[in-house]
Image: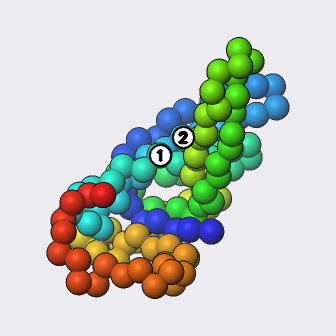
Amino acid sequence: MFELNGIVKVKRDEQKVSDSFKKREFVVTDNSSNYPQHILFQLTQERCRLLDDINVGDNVKVAFFIKGREWQGKDGGGVKYFTSLDAWRVERGSKDYTQDSSAAVSSASSNSGGLSDAGDTDDLPF
């Protein structure tokens, strides 16, 4: 599981995708680097209500899973791959994350495979 702290930029209404599936999307802005990142998350099923008490502009902490899936159309076209960030928990934050350089936290950061950007002065967003 991963975690991200940021500010809610967009809060969309719940969508009924099918009779048995509903989702709700929201965007969180991560200002922890030189370039703000606007990250789309989704809540599904009963978790859609987690956004009910959250407003645009609120500081939040989002715990999420990365999910990927493969899809091939019925017409025999090429295979496509989709990635989604499925929010598991959304908590209102009490801290201003706009200036905090440690706001984005990943539980996998300790498993970076020996890669480090400690001496990296490149400020490109990718």
Q: Where is residue 45 in the image (x, y as percent from the top left)?
A: 73, 43
Amino acid type at circle 2 is Glu
The circle on residue 25 is 2
Quarter of the image where one finds residue 98: bottom left
Taking the spot 23% from the left edge, 70% from the top edge, the residue there is 99
- How far apart are labels 1 and 2 at the CA level? 7 Å
In the rendered image of this protein, does residue 20 appear above or below residue 77? below
Amino acid type at circle 1 is Leu
Of the 4 image quadrants, the one containing the C terminus is bottom left
The circle on residue 115 is none
* Residue 125 in the figure: left or right of residue 95: left
Confirm whether residue 51 shows in the render: no
Q: Name the residue under label 1.
A: 40
Among the two numbered marks 1 and 2 on one chain, the one whose residue lies closer to the N terminus: 2
Furthest-right residue in this view: 20
Foreground label between 1 and 2: 1
Of the 4 image quadrants, the one containing the N terminus is bottom right
Q: Where is residue 15 in the image (x, y as percent from the top left)?
A: 63, 29
* Residue 118 in the figure: left or right of residue 12: left
* Residue 56 in the figure: left or right of residue 34: right
Q: How is the image coloured?
A: rainbow
Label 2 Cα crowd, 10 Å radius (few <14 / some 14-19 / many 20+): many
Taking the spot 65% from the left edge, 32% from the top edge, the residue there is 79
C-beta proximity under 8 Å, tags 1 and 2: yes
In the rendered image of this protein, does residue 2 appear above or below residue 52? below
Taking the spot 71% from the left edge, 19% from the top edge, the residue there is 76
